[in-house]
Amino acid sequence: MPIIGLTGNFGMGKTTVLSLFKRSGAYTFNVDRFVHEILKQPETIKKIARELGDDVLVKRSNKISVNKSRIANIIFYDSSKRKAIEKIVHPQVLRAIKSTSATILKKDRSALIVFEVPLLFEAGYEHIFDKTIVVYCSKDKALSRLKRKGFSKADAHSRLRAQMPITRKKRLANFVINNSRDIDYTWKQIKCILSNLKQ
């Protein structure tokens, strides 16, 4: 089975779709978890501080960490800063994806592995996956979901603007999933994709 890269834009339901793939028996991973671990590494912390300043650091006793919300507030409003941080983090994310896939396939050659990657196309990650899937819904639906999660309208708009337009992502993907309706509608689309992959 192929290694899948799953993406979409902010608030469009990537994580919901990932959970449905897990229900189907796939090995699933949210790449943000990899980023979370990468951001704990002392060398990564130093590089980020050099780019964004010491204001993003959190110092507790002898431990230094980064404040992810402060980083997000900077990079979603400043594309040059975002690109600088991506250059630090992305190579390590790629290594984690490849290592994770290799470990699973060594045990199970028929495994279906799905990685949720928010910035898959923006980061140029598509070449490391056998197939890509884009989850989409209308912008209004995404904004409504984000509002329910506590994001302000301005913050939600800025995050959506920082990503490639969803129409372009849909054109680049091997498969698309319309996540505008209920969970059963989404699940039917996933079953069709799974059937296609098995063939």
Image: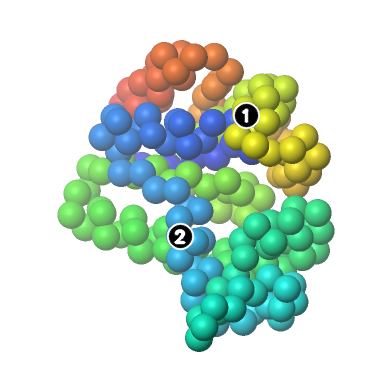
Between 51 and 95, the one nearer to me in the picture: 51
Residue for badge 2: 34
Between 107 and 18, the one nearer to me in the picture: 18
Judged from the image, the secondary structure of the residue bearing numbered disc 1 is helix
Q: Residue furthest front?
A: 61
Say which quarter of the image contains residue 150: top right
User: Which numbered disc, 2 or 1, marks the residue that appears first in the sequence?
Assistant: 2
Q: Amino acid at mark 1?
A: Arg
Quadrant for the C terminus in the image = top left
Q: Residue 73 — which label?
A: none
Q: Would you say 111 lies left or right of 128 here?
A: left
What x and y, as percent, mark residue 189? 44, 19
What x and y, as percent, mark residue 66? 60, 70
Q: Residue furthest bottom?
A: 62
Which residue is at 51% across, 61% downward?
35
Which residue is at 76% across, 60% downward?
74
Quadrant for the N terminus in the image = top left
Which residue is at 69% across, 61% downward?
70
Q: Would you say 48 lies left or right of 34 here?
A: right
Which residue is at 42% across, 36% downward?
18
Q: Is residue 54 visible?
A: yes
Residue for badge 1: 148
Q: Is residue 132 above or below residue 87?
A: above
Judged from the image, the secondary structure of the residue bearing numbered disc 2 is helix
Q: Amino acid at mark 2?
A: Phe
Between 159 and 187, the one nearer to me in the picture: 159
